Every structure is written in C-alpha cells, then in structure tokens.
Amino acid sequence: MAKSYFWCVGCRRSFDAPDVVDERCPLCGRAMQQVGWVSAFLRGVMAQELVASGLPSRHKAIIRMVWTANGMGERYYKALAPGVPYGKFESAVTEMVCRAAADGWVRIVLPPSPIGAQDGDYRLEIDDEERFIEEMAALFERAVGEADQDRN
Ligand SMILES: [Zn+2]
C-alpha cells in the first residue's frame, strides 16, 4: 500500500497521513494537500534549499564583485591611498556599500539571468555620489585615527 502524506504550504513540511485529522495541519490548522511520497520528499528538499544558510555571505560576495568590477576597486584604492592593504580596503568598502544599499541610496542592479548578460548589466546605482566618496574616505580616516591611538 502506497504511503501518503499531506503537505502544509504554511509550515513548508509534510505530515504522515495517520497523524493528520480532517486534512488540517497539526501545527497551524491550515487545510493541506495530499501528496505522494516522492512529491513530499522533493518539496521537503526544496523547502530546505530555499532557507539554505550562507546565502547572505554569498550575496555580499556578489556586491563586492559588482563594486570592484572593471578595475574600480583598484582605482578607488589608488585615489584614496587608504594606508591599509588592498584586501582590507575592499572588505571595508563592501560593508559600506551593503549599509548604503540597506539604507536605499545605493542599489545593486543585477540582470534577471546570466544568460546573455553583459558586464554592464551588473552595476551600482548611486543616488548621491558625493556622499559615496565621503563615506568611503571617512572609513579610512577613522582607521588611521585608530592606528594613531594604538601607537600612543
Ligand atoms: Zn502548517
């Protein structure tokens, strides 16, 4: 006899048929859909995938790639001469870009798919370029100040 399952869209998990009363989710009470075991298994795998950990750090890596593209990272670095190694500079500016994007005055634009995408389809849109330069410069003025304090 094929085992059957019920899937709750709200809880994103399946329940064994014997545990289910009136086709209602035992956790949230929502009406559920009866599914076969393959479907229950695949839906469960997908639910895991959709909440996979580590995505925010990959998101940050994409933002880093976008703002440093076309040698912009090196160009900003040379212009600012921040007095820290390039890797440290890149991380600090990436954090700043993430904060600016969270505040909404910088947007990271990505094409809907890499198929057919050009480099120029990945870009930063900066509402206030003056503020961008000032905040970037301020990151390293502070770093230099802290280094001075360490020496005293
Ligand atoms: Zn539920």
Image (cartoon, helix red, strand yellow):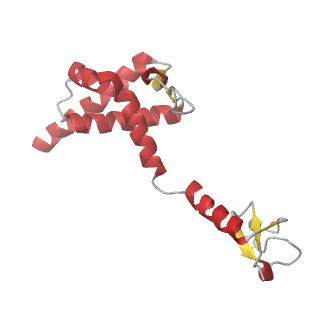
- Residue lying furthest front in this view? 1
Quarter of image, res 44? bottom right
Note whether 72 is above or below 51 in the view shown. Answer: above
Q: Nearer the viewer, residue 77 or 36?
A: 36
The number of numbered discs placed on residues in the rendered structure image is 0
Q: Is residue 9 above or below residue 69?
A: below
Can you give x and y, in whole percent of width and height, for residue 73 in the image?
A: 29, 27
Is 1 positioned to the left or the right of 22 in the image?
Answer: left
Q: Position of residue 40 (x, y in %)?
A: 70, 67
Q: Split into 4 quadrants, where in the image is the N terminus?
A: bottom right
> Which residue is rendered at x = 28% and y = 22% of the image?
76
| Quarter, ligand 1 | bottom right
Q: Does residue 117 appear in this view? A: yes
Most distant residue in the right direction = 22
Q: Residue furthest top?
A: 130
Residue 35 image point, x, y percent: 77, 67
Whether residue 25 sits left or right of residue 117 in the image: it is: right
How far across and down, in percent of the image, does residue 69 sit? 35, 26
Of 105 and 34, which appears nearest the observer?
Answer: 34
Q: Quadrant of the C terminus?
A: top left
Q: Residue at image x 37%, y 33%?
A: 65
**On screen, residue 21 above or below 7:** below
Question: Does residue 152 appear in this view?
Answer: no
Q: Nearer the viewer, residue 81 or 72?
A: 72
